[in-house]
């Protein structure tokens, strides 16, 4: 966490008011999903997570799943995005009983556009391989050992980021699903001043 905090990742992450980059990514079953097609139906919630191997990510995915009916009632779509190969998305979907798409961001190309990618340190990389049998090179299908900082964005139908939560603390720095729902409520029912 300190490595991420001391880097400039958090300073360069997209923020409220920025335009979200257009994307087309495969879901866990090989279907292409584009931001444009999602936005055609209303606002979109994007949750970037590290991978199905991360217990904190799985807790967040389950919390988002529990809040999904409220999001849908506000006309929103939800997608989660990971650098893992699509089979990681299948595992995450089954393990967490998810009904929203898990998208595969090969080489963190989209996460990089959002400004949320960091380099995993050698010590963490070696520990992950030896102690936890977690080889990111195999899981992600490439050898960069880079991950997205956990981040959640709410994007309005015009493609503008209306809420963002980016935190280096992958354990306790996650956004509450109810906070995401509150951001969607502000889009659906803007406060007039």
Image (cartoon, rainbow, N blue to C red):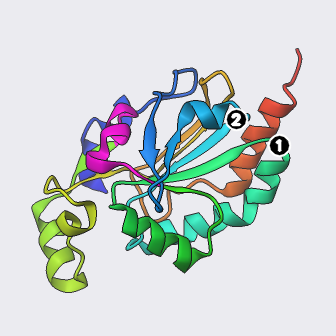
Please tell me which residue is depicted at 57% across the width and 64% down the height of the picture. Answer: 60
- What label does residue 104 carry, if any? none
Spatial separation of the CA atoms under disc 2 and disc 1: 9 Å
Q: In this orientation, does residue 155 appear?
A: no
Q: Is residue 161 left or right of residue 40?
A: left
Q: Which residue is mark 2?
A: 43
Residue neighbourhood size for the residue with mark 1, other residues' Cα within 10 Å, grouped as few (<14), some (14–19), many (≥20): some
Residue 64: give x, y in percent of width and height.
65, 60
- Asked whether residue 21 is in view, the answer is yes
Give coordinates of residue 139: x percent, y percent: 27, 67
Q: Is residue 142 left or right of residue 49?
A: left
Q: Is residue 152 above or below residue 58?
A: above
Disc 2 and disc 1 in contact, CB within 8 angstroms = yes
Span shown in magenta: 103-116
The residue that appears at 38% across and 60% down in the rendered structure is: 50
Label 1 secondary element: loop
Which quarter of the picture shows residue 83?
Answer: bottom left
Q: Position of residue 105 (x, y in %)?
A: 36, 48
**N-terminal-most mark, 2 or 1:** 2
The residue that appears at 68% across and 56% down in the rendered structure is 177
């Amino acid at each position: 966490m300190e490595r991420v905090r001391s880097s400039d990742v958090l300073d360069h992450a997209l923020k409220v008011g920025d335009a979200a980059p257009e994307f087309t990514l495969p879901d866990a079953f090989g279907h292409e999903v584009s931001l444009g097609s999602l936005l055609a139906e209303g606002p979109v919630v994007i949750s970037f997570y590290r991978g199905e191997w991360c217990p904190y990510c799985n807790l967040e995915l389950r919390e988002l799943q529990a809040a999904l009916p409220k999001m849908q009632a506000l006309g929103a779509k939800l997608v989660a995005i990971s650098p893992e190969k699509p089979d990681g998305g299948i595992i995450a979907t089954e393990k967490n009983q998810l009904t929203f798409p898990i998208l595969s961001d090969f080489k963190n190309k989209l996460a990089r556009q959002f400004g949320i990618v960091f380099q995993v340190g050698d010590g963490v990389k070696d520990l992950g391989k030896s102690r936890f049998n977690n080889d990111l090179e195999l899981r992600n299908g490439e050898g960069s050992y880079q991950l997205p900082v956990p981040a959640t964005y709410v994007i309005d139908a015009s493609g503008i980021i209306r809420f963002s939560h980016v935190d280096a603390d992958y354990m306790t720095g996650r956004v509450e699903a109810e906070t995401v729902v509150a951001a969607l409520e502000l889009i659906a029912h803007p406060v007039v001043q």
